[in-house]
Amino acid sequence: MKRLRWPSWMPIDPYILLLLGTVGLAALFPARGPAADVASGASTAAVALLFFLYGARLSTREALDGLRHWRLHVTVLACTFLVFPLLGLAARGLVPVILTHPLYQGLLFLTLVPSTVQSSIAFTSMARGNVPAAICAGSFSSLVGIVATPLLAASLLGGSGGGFSADSLLKIVLQLLVPFLAGQLLRRWIGGFVTRHKQVLGLVDRGSILLVVYTAFSVGVVQGIWHQVSPARLGGLVVVEAVILAVMLLLTWYGGKALRFGRADRIAIQFAGSKKSLAAGLPMASVLFGAQAALAVLPLMLFHQMQLIVGAVIAKRRARDAAAEVSAPQPAAATRTAVGTGTRSG
């Protein structure tokens, strides 16, 4: 029996369909009363397990080896935690004409979360870029984001962002950082097990995120948050996010060229520097925003799907360009007289 595969022509990630289905489930059957308490407790445990697995997977040796390409990693971190937040702050001028204040808070939070690992690696590989650099860049971004994202959120969103306080930061440390560090400490003994069963544990990852989404959106449905979002506001949010993504894609590509990175490195910078992690952002939002988490994660969910669709298109184009460069015939005379003198613009 052949294994069923998701059609390659389908632009929507199947996991996004699961996320949307989870949102629909929360809308029809939200957790209430004692069930809400159980879902909240299970969500908290799932988030701790999620970050424990992150810590167990990240190889300290690979992270140290990746430091040799520090210019690339600094560039990606600057895009993720400096340029993105600046764009988020600039969007403040769109309130209240295009965005409501709660939607803007979610948009600003989106710009603060770390980059992705899986999709950055996948798209970099597809586009024939520097895959090891993408692995290290995504890992460094995730590691830095555990500390940087809550601190940036506390600083930029302040008391109006869902109750940010010393207590919120303590919850982040206990629920995210401590499990992550525990995973790193135990990696020596459980790293092999995690590697051998990465597909099964990947289901645990995604299941944990679905549980977080269900809990957050259940709270939103019970409290009637969704009456605050009109179709016009939602459309405005999509347009704003499309503009932010386009700016970051152009900046990472041409900025990498201005910084004299090679084509393979520029591909890694573009994909790692223009992405935002749904897996890291959702658990953080559930801790930081509490009852307002449903609206806070909506911009992140939309941006995640958008970056996957656009990233796939760009990666395929980069792959075609690379194949064309390799297969392009050169005149024999020019080849003999100009070996080593050509330039590549990427």
Image (spheres, grey):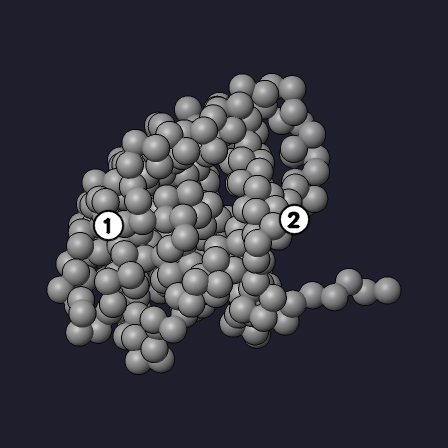
Q: Mark 1: few, some, or many residues within 10 Å (few <14, many ≥20)?
A: few
Left or right, residue 155 beside residue 149: left
* Residue 118 marker: none
* Residue 203 marker: 2
Closest to the observer: 73 or 289? 289
At label 2, the amino acid type is: Leu
**Quadrant (top left, top right, bottom left, bottom right) of the N terminus:** bottom right
**Quadrant (top left, top right, bottom left, bottom right) of the C terminus:** bottom left
At x 58%, y 23%, the residue is 187
x and y, in percent, of residue 176 in the image: 46, 34
Left or right, residue 254 beside residue 311: left
The single residue placed furthest to the bottom in the displayed view is 232
Quadrant hosting residue 158: top left
Q: Mark 2: few, some, or many residues within 10 Å (few <14, many ≥20)?
A: few
Q: Report the Cα–Cα distance between label 1 and label 2.
A: 35 Å
At x 38%, y 61%, the residue is 295
At x 24%, y 50%, the residue is 160
The single residue placed furthest to the front in the displayed view is 33
